[in-house]
Image: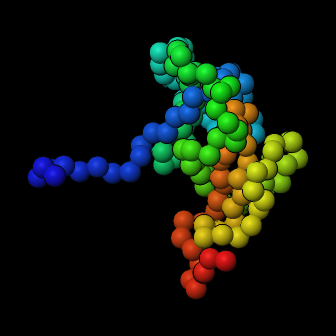
Amino acid sequence: MPKDFELSGPAFVGLVVRDVAASAEFYERKLGFRRDPEGFRVPGGAGVTFLTYPILFAIGPAPPGLDLEKIPRPILVPALWFKTANSHVVHDALVKDGVTILRPLKTGRFGRQFTFVDPDGYAITIYDRDAPPEGWEAD
């Protein structure tokens, strides 16, 4: 590597979606994300950026020629995880709103975690701990 070559982790994550308006409403109303008023434009139309922390999250239209209907569901890659203070509360709210839960709430390496499916079929995991508890071992 060159002498001053340095990268940090991701600073932006974006997903392509079938219907930007419907997906934006889902992420606003079901997950409580706030839109960045500036948004962004990509080939194919306008996207929506959310003011998530520490990494910005966005959705945008699929580029011309990409048929999202042909991708098998659930969409497991890229792996996308959102952190919360209380996975159980988020889980119960999403269940109440009729969101499909792909993997049930359980204790795992990253605390209480579960995976749901968003309107486009992306599998998204919610978790509440950055490191395993001391002495934690996988099943």
| Quarter that holds the C terminus | bottom right
Picture residue at 72% right of the left edge, 24% below the top: 22
Q: On the picture, is 6 further left or further right than 136?
A: left
Q: Measured from the top left, where is residue 71 in percent x and y? A: 64, 32
Q: Name the image colouring.
A: rainbow
Q: Is residue 93 visible?
A: no
Picture residue at 23% right of the left edge, 51% below the top: 6
Q: Measured from the top left, where is residue 119 in percent x and y? A: 73, 33
Determine the image quadrant of residue 78. Answer: top right
Q: Compared with residue 120, is residue 112 higher up or lower down, i.e. above or below?
A: below
Determine the image quadrant of residue 58. Answer: top right
Which residue reaches farthest left?
A: 3
Q: On the picture, is 91 further left or further right than 124?
A: right
Determine the image quadrant of residue 12. Answer: top left
Q: On the picture, is 95 further left or further right than 14?
A: right
Q: Is residue 71 visible?
A: yes
Picture residue at 83% right of the left edge, 54% below the top: 92
Q: Nearer the viewer, residue 100 or 68?
A: 68
Q: Compared with residue 62, is residue 129 higher up or lower down, i.e. above or below?
A: below
